[in-house]
Image (cartoon, rainbow, N blue to C red):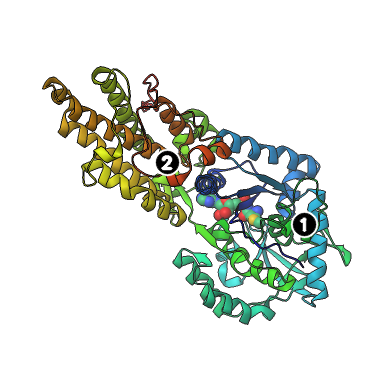
Amino acid sequence: MNLVDKTEKTFALTTPLYYVNDLPHIGSAYTTIAADVVARFQRLLGRPVLLVTGTDEHGQKIQRTAESKGLPPQIFCDQMSSGFVSLWQLLNIRYDRFIRTTDPRHETLVREFFQRLWDNGDIYQGQQKGWYCVSCEEFKEERELLEGHYCPIHPNKEAEWRDEQNYFFRLSKYQTQIEALYQSQPDFVQPETRRNEVLSFIKQGLQDFSISRVNLEWGFPVPTDPSHTLYVWFDALLGYLTALLENNTEPNLENALEKWWPINLHLIGKDILRFHAISWPAMLMSSGLPLPERIFVHGFLTKDGLKMGKSLGNTVDPVALTTTYGADAVRYYFLKEIEFGRDGDFNEGRFIDVLNADLANDLGNLLNRTLGMVKKYCAGNVPPITSEDIPNDSALKSIGLCLGEQVKNAYEALAFDKACDAILKLVRASNKFIDEQAPWSLYKQGQQQATEKVLYSVLESVRLAAYLLSPVIPNISHNIYQQLGFEIDFNNQAQTSITAPFAIHGTWGVLTDKQKLGEPSPVFKRIEPSK
Ligand code: MSP
């Protein structure tokens, strides 16, 4: 196959393809927000980006749920899938592809991929005996299950005993190659804890796994034996490939691989690690395709310290949360409050405190009070100061000069909390700087240039903070930029990467007196906690 060399440094990333057995939950929103932030940041760097998300619509779990609602599975999937599309809109997610695994083009690609594995002698028929958790859509070892064969991830669901003819994928054949992969690419799975988990699993010896089901209608037939249906995970992972097809091209592997393959980053939750870190690379090895670059695994969200679940009745509805507080608030809380890669908690009190402290007080008030002072002391214009007029070791410039690089590294390492913390440090230093420098007394004493230097330094720092936070809180950043007189819309990424590239706007000292400042207005309204 003729793979196009990725000379132009493109960046393709994926969220998992979400099951449509239920409406999107906060966990699906969490990954998708993170993916959107990464994509937005990469676009600021000027890279062509493809953000892939979508829905995983086959399998027993979905067939059964559709049956229980009395709906044909396709109708049920159509309804549920649109719930994801509208949540992504509400959360201001700029995805490029939304793949549904029931897309007929997907079936064509799956057949071609299956054929490669088949031709390679990696698929054979055998007897599958074992405990199957329908909610995980996964066979479990007896030792992995709780007493009574309940699944530890779905403790109210009993795994079901299966003893049936299935087609198997020869995973065991790839033991050495998978080991070599982890040797040569220590960053293939991050963070380290998850990589270690994979390594110890590999050490136990990889076993072939079944890729077909009998007595299941909802899925693609096995190309070589239509009396079997392809296992939902087999077709789901291949959704990452189908998603890369351009709209009007013929659905085949060659076209799918043309521009965006290999994927640069898969974002996943910790429960679907093995599929992505072991089965997926082995399937790709068998098909002769290059492997993705990196898999980053995030933790699970809890509510008030408890595992979220329908049985506990403590789920967090992302639609309600976003409708109440707005997209930026939800995006900011989850990324700032939780170290990406670890488990994290949602608590409404904490949620309100963080937003009020960081966005309403520290950032919002800073802009507001500074613009107010600029109005009073500088006739409402950006002071005619340039970065050169301010010494490099001055309080704000010294932070601002290193911030862009620091935040870039943090975003690239998916350390969103660190990126936000570093930016907020500049914001807090700016508030402190105003208090200490007291431009109101400098002005009273007739020290116009000193007043202007202080106000310029602060305005410029707010600008830089808004720019660097724009992947996380695009609406607020847009609002701040407008008040600073820029016609740059962080929701129009193509325009932004040209008019405000990171190489320029990510540094300190961009603001000039050519900017016509806008009217000050609060960028984030303080949330009053309900009783
Ligand atoms: N359909 C599969 C993925 C196929 S990818 C080719 C799937 N779907 S899912 O809808 O069940 O899960 C999607 C993602 O949500 C997973 O990454 C999972 O880890 C994540 N989460 C599910 N519950 C979660 C929390 N409570 N917290 C954070 N993420 C959670 O698995």
Question: Of callouts 1 and 2, which one flags the residue occurring earlier in the amino acid sequence?
Answer: 1
Foreground pick, 244 / 514: 514
> Which corner quadrant holds the N terminus?
bottom right
Q: Amino acid at mark 2?
A: His
Query: Do the numbered discs 1 and 2 sit on residues whose CB atoms are within 8 Å?
Result: no
Residue 48, visible in the rendered structure:
yes
Which labelled disc corresponds to residue 332? none
Q: Position of residue 41 (x, y in %)?
A: 49, 47
Q: Position of residue 83 (x, y in %)?
A: 65, 37
* Disc 2 crowd, CA 10 A, few/some/many (<14, 14-19, 20+): some
Q: Secondary structure at mark 1?
A: helix
Mark 2 highlights which residue? 505
344 w.r.t. 490: above or below: below
Secondary element under disc 2, as helix, strand or loop, is helix
Residue 255: image tag: 1
Which of the image's four quarters has the C terminus? top left
- Residues 496 and 429: in front is 496
